[in-house]
Amino acid sequence: MSTKVYLGVGSNLNRENSLRFAFAKISPLLKNCKKSSIWISKPVRNGEPDYFNMVISGDTESNLEEFHTCLMKIEEMAGKEVMINDGTNFGMKRRLDIDILAFGQLETSTPCIIPRHDIQDYPFVTCPLNELDPDFVHPVLHKKVSELWAKLEPTLSDDKKVVKTSIDWNVEAPVWNNASKD
Ligand SMILES: Nc1ncnc2c1ncn2[C@@H]1O[C@H](COP(=O)(O)OP(=O)(O)OP(=O)(O)O)[C@@H](O)[C@H]1O
Ligand SMILES: Nc1nc2c(c(=O)[nH]1)N=C(CO)CN2
């Protein structure tokens, strides 16, 4: 039996390469794998560099535990590094964050919280999810993502807005270093 999953992927360290790495590792795990564009937004926590975010969807044959373990391994594989921005040292940070937003119709808190509140609360999740699948119905709120986005978007101040990047998946990502902020 396969389950349709939605994943939120974010990075603000080597961010374009990190999202490409995530897609390269996740797409073989999913049938009918699809991805949104990459969107840029300000961090929730002030001072960090801006984030790149995307949403990936597809069908898995795995159960939640197996699938969650695979995703944590992918996050680990992407590694960590010291994040320094404008002279502030944020310490060791994961390059890649992968969250399971929804796992079919499941509602649970073990081994992780499903569905994630990010779907309706974080524009950097709602917006790419709406781009990918506006007709997806939230398993608990029973509302289409298009309705959730229509409610959230008009409330956003400039610092919460998300902007679509023009990243072309067919062109190789630029070389990155900790000072380039890309
Ligand atoms: N659905 C999920 N998929 C993947 N990881 C999850 C999921 N739910 C929780 N986690 C992981 O559990 C930890 C705590 O998550 P939680 O949502 O409570 O806080 P957070 O992500 O740090 O903050 P916020 O609520 O502001 O998004 C994080 O490491 C998070 O990545
Ligand atoms: N814009 C944006 N901000 C964040 C994000 C994210 O993915 N996008 N993830 C965070 C923790 O993982 C904290 N802040």
Image: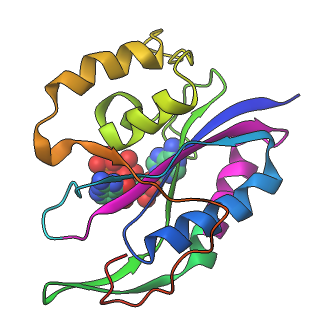
Say if the magenta span includes residue 58: yes
Give the x, y percent position of residue 149. 35, 22
Q: Residue at x 49, y 49 (%)?
A: 54
Q: Residue at x 45, y 86 (%)?
A: 176
Give the x, y percent position of residue 66. 75, 51
Q: Quadrant of residue 162?
A: top left
Side (left or right) of 167 relative to 23: left
Give the x, y percent position of residue 3. 76, 30
Say if the magenta span includes residue 161: no
Which stretch did the figure color magenta? Answer: 48-74
Quadrant that contains the N terminus:
top right
92, above or below 21, in the image: below
32, above or below 154, in the image: below
Quadrant that contains the C terminus:
bottom left
Q: How many marks?
A: 0
Q: Residue at x 40, y 76 (%)?
A: 13
Q: Residue at x 51, y 80 (%)?
A: 174
174, above or below 106, in the image: below
Side (left or right) of 23 relative to 124: right
Q: Quadrant of residue 160?
A: top left
Q: Nearer the viewer, residue 111 or 175?
A: 175
Give the x, y percent position of residue 156. 16, 33
Q: Nearer the viewer, residue 50 or 172?
A: 172
